[in-house]
Image (cartoon, grey):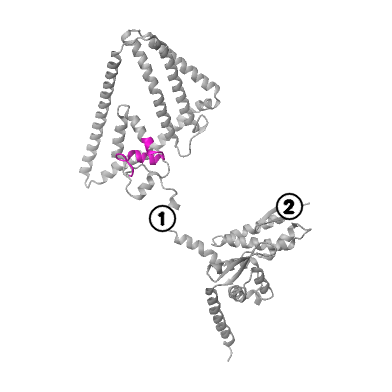
Amino acid sequence: MNKVITINLGGNAYQLEEGGYDVLRAYLDSAGVRLQGNPDRDEIISDIERAIAEKLRALLGSNKTVVETKEVQAVIAEMGPIETDPAEAAAPSAGSAGARPAGEQRTAGAGPPPRRLYRIHEGAMFAGVCNGIAAYMSVDPTLVRLAFVFLTMFWGTGVLVYLVMAIVVPEASSPEEKAAASGIPSTAQEFIRRAKAGYYEAMKGFPDRKARREWQRRFKQDMRQWRRSFAWEMRWNACQWQHNWHNYWAQQPPFNSAMGFALPILSMLHGAATILWICALVSLLSTGAIFGQALPATLPVWVAALLLCIIYGILSAPLKLARRACSWGFGHPAGAGPFIFLADAVVWVAVALSLAWLAVHFSPALREAVRSVPALAHQATGDIQTWWTKK
Amino acid sequence: MNVNEKFSGLRKGLLEFLLLQIIAAEKVYVADILRELSATEFATQEGTLYPLLSKMRREGLLDYEWKESEAGPPRKYYQLTAKGREQLRETQEYWGRINGTVKKLGQK
């Protein structure tokens, strides 16, 4: 008793003994190998399959439905080995290798082009920074613009970052650069590399050593100056905000008992949000997924982490404001004393600790994540060290 | 090495010429060609014939059309193109010259 395999040859079904099937399979496979590089390879193979089908059909009758192994062997012997003109078989492959355009060879050798951060002018609002970042991270430019607007809310950080990037990031002018602007994802290191390259490129432009040194000195001086003025600007802004804040809350002396209840609740919410955020961040960095939810393949981990921080910022900002409002409502004009702050702090810490304990206790994934933090930190510092020494 | 082995390269080279001649006479399919060749020194097999026919078709020497068969899958019937006929004519001429040379040489 032999096992029977049904095959499709030239649109008809045939039943072969298993050994016969193996013989036929081997013959067709070797035909495919021998016809490698032949432009009519598929057609010749289907011709051969049809010819075999016709021979098999001649063997079968009304009371014989299965082709035996030795019959298949006889048919294959009758077909003969696939013979191709050696010159013909070699010609197409040699031709395809020789005639391949230079561009194709370059991409074949170097793999996909690396992605670079460029400013992109097409469809840009200002200097094309957001557009370039969007292309670099494969997201909608509107999202990037919103992120910048959001950052601007914190002492104008967004505007500053935008200005710096508009100066430092080169513009994509050639087609190659435009292609590279939305190539494959890379790391934030690329940004640093670009900025440095721009600096050294400018250095090369100076003919003699003296002028170069002078320019170098000026560059460093400018940087220092810029850093100082930036810090001063920040401080001044912060003062201004604080001042406004005080003024605003000083004008309203509402002592409301509802606030006494609201404060611990707000604190709890804020604590919960913070814990959740930290847990999500830890699970993202240690497992590459947020609580087992895999990220979209196009989203790099560092972008996801950044997004997580932004989301946390958006969510916690109103809570923070409300808590401040309550505290100020209590503490300042009405003079409820430092007790309310103490109570708030105690509640906050208690909520945070208990939530953390619950999370670590009941989620094995999280426990694993927490356990892997030291190793991860070790690895990260190692990476930075090697990067530094290489530089 | 007998004569048969010695001239295997020559036979292989001539096969294309013979195919042109066979197909020129009538529309044929591969089994017809094999049958016609089987009785001669040029007996061959499908494994050789199909790649050769597809090469000739690629060169524009012949063409095929599908015909249903009473049993089994449809068959390809081959016929010569104008270019194929031209090639056949040239080859016949050339073959005639070679034949003449072979007979003439060495006879004084």
Q: Is residue A126 magenta?
A: yes
The answer to whether A213 appears left or right of A327 in the picture is left
Residue A25: mark: none
Q: Which residue is mark 1?
A: A103
Which segment did they paint magenta?
A122-144
Residue at 32 percent of width and 32 percent of height: A158
Q: Chain of mark 2?
A: A
Residue at 25 percent of width and 46 percent of height: A205
Q: Chain of mark 1?
A: A
Q: Is residue B62 magenta?
A: no
Please, what is the three-letter code of the amino acid marked with disc 2?
Val
Q: Which residue is mark 2?
A: A4
Q: Quadrant of the C terminus of chain A?
A: top left
Residue A308: which quarter of the image?
top left
Residue at 54 percent of width and 24 percent of height: A363
- Above or below: residue B59 compared with residue A252: below
Q: Position of residue A183 (x, y in %)?
A: 41, 45
Label 1: few (<14), some (14–19) or many (≥20) C-alpha neighbours in 10 Å? few
